[in-house]
Image: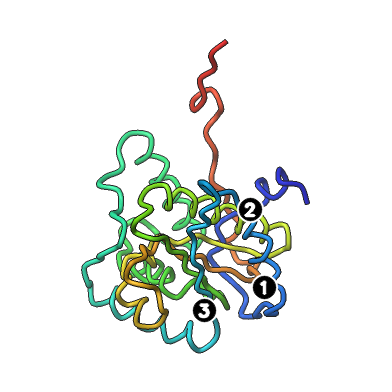
Amino acid sequence: MSVQKALEGRFSCRKFAETPLPRTVINDLLKTVQKTASWCNTQPWSIDVISGESLKRLSDSLIQSASRGDVPNPDFDFPEQYSGVFRERRKVCGLQLYDSVGIQKGEVEKTKEQSLENFNFFSAPHALFISTPKELGLYGALDCGLYISSFMLLAQDLGINTIAQAAVASYPDVIRQHVQIDINRYLLCGISFGYGEESHPVNKYRTERESIENVAVFYD
């Protein structure tokens, strides 16, 4: 598969089959993603992969925290607000999600249940967490962003579905109870991955992309 086809085919999978990936497949995937470019070849990312019963226990803990309404305390501050076109794009994305699973405006309980699916890792058999050293700051996070993109595109190339999840970084203290992420590293996000349930309606909608005229300026 070309990079172009991987980009065109990738989507945020929100319903996975329970079928686990062979460890050799995961190892080969990570080995290739390790070729991702980074600032001065620092390769600041650290990857923790969690599966099976360990993932189930972590999921239970996260769901408990979110259900109680525990205040999120991410290592990296979430956006202060979404305004203008950013707010509109986010709104449309949310409406598409709710429409795909039949949630109507005002159905608060169903909306909460769908939100908790983030902490169930959308039933994925595997999840990974990516972290970066505090001392590398913004540029360490930038390099990890490149890694995340490489991971999702290569996974797509291999027929593996993914979804990058900032939501699971809401409770880094909970995650550190299950995964040994050093306190001197910032947790950026998680990625759930596995084989998606193609027939599920939540995996059928696609978000739009802005036209080049609205995001690029050319100088001759």
Query: What amino acid is labelled 2 in the image?
Result: Arg
Query: What amino acid is labelled 3 in the image?
Result: Ile
- What whole-number distance in Å separates the C-alpha atoms at marks 3 and 2? 22 Å
**Residue 35 shown left or right of residue 82 in the figure:** right
Q: Residue at x 33, y 34 (%)?
A: 84
Q: Picture quarter containing residue 85?
A: top left
Q: Quadrant of the C terminus?
A: top right
- Marks 3 and 1, the one that precedes in the sequence: 1
Q: Residue at x 40, y 46 (%)?
A: 90
Q: Position of residue 103 (x, y in %)?
A: 42, 61
**Disc 1 target residue:** 27
Q: Which mark is residue 50?
A: 3
Up-down: is 152 above or below 178? above
Q: Which mark is residue 185?
A: none
Query: What amino acid is labelled 1 in the image?
Result: Asn
- Front-most of 81 and 97? 81
Q: Position of residue 190 (x, y in %)?
A: 46, 65
- Front-most of 201 and 217? 217
